Amino acid sequence: MHLNGVGWIAAIIIGGLAGWFAEMFMKSNTGIFMNIVMGIVGAVVLNAILQAINFGPFGVGWIAYLITGFIGACLLIWVGRLVRR
């Protein structure tokens, strides 16, 4: 699992922020635990997608992790809505 140069504790905090921003942006209704999970998993999923198409990550550090987590969490919310329909 690649965390863009941040530690586990920082990944949880930044993942929570990224998930919360995605929740607000996508007008979803999830709790704090799901925000953290979506932010972290979203960052990992988006990194995997970017590596699969030979496009590097957005950078290294907490800002890059926040951006990646936000976009990845938005993708997860979007896919979740598609599956529920």
Image (cartoon, grey):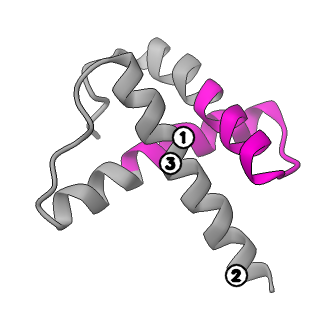
Mark-to-mark CA distance, 2 and 1: 20 Å
Residue 18 lies in the magenta stretch: yes
Mark 2 crowdedness (10 Å alpha carbons): few <14, some 14-19, many ≥20: few
Residue 30 vs 82, above or below: the answer is above
Which residue in the protein does label 2 denote?
83
Q: Earlier in the sequence, mark 2 or mark 1?
A: 1
As drawn, the label of residue 70 is 1
Q: Residue at x 30, y 18 (%)?
A: 61
Q: Is residue 65 above or below residue 56?
A: above
**Are the residues tagged 3 and 1 within 8 Å (C-beta)?**
yes
- Mark in front: 2 vs 3: 3
Q: From the viewer's perspective, is the residue at label 2 or at label 1 nearer? A: 1
Of marks 2 and 3, which one's residue comes earlier in the chain? 3
Quarter occupied by the C terminus:
bottom right
* Mark 1 surroundings within 10 Å by alpha-carbon count, few (fewer than 14), some (14 through 19), many (20 or more): many
* Quarter location, residue 58: top left
Picture quarter containing residue 6? top left
Specify the segment rendered in magenta.
17-44
> Which label number is shown at residue 80?
none
Query: Is 82 on the left-hand or right-hand side of 75?
Result: right
Q: Secondary structure at mark 2?
A: helix
Secondary element under disc 3, as helix, strand or loop, is: helix
Residue drawn where x is 31% and y is 30% of the image: 3
Asked whether residue 49 is drawn in magenta, I would say no
* 73 in relation to 82, above or below: above
Q: Residue at x 64, y 27 (%)?
A: 16
Q: How far is mark 3 from mark 1, CA to CA?
A: 4 Å
Q: What residue is shown with label 3?
A: 71
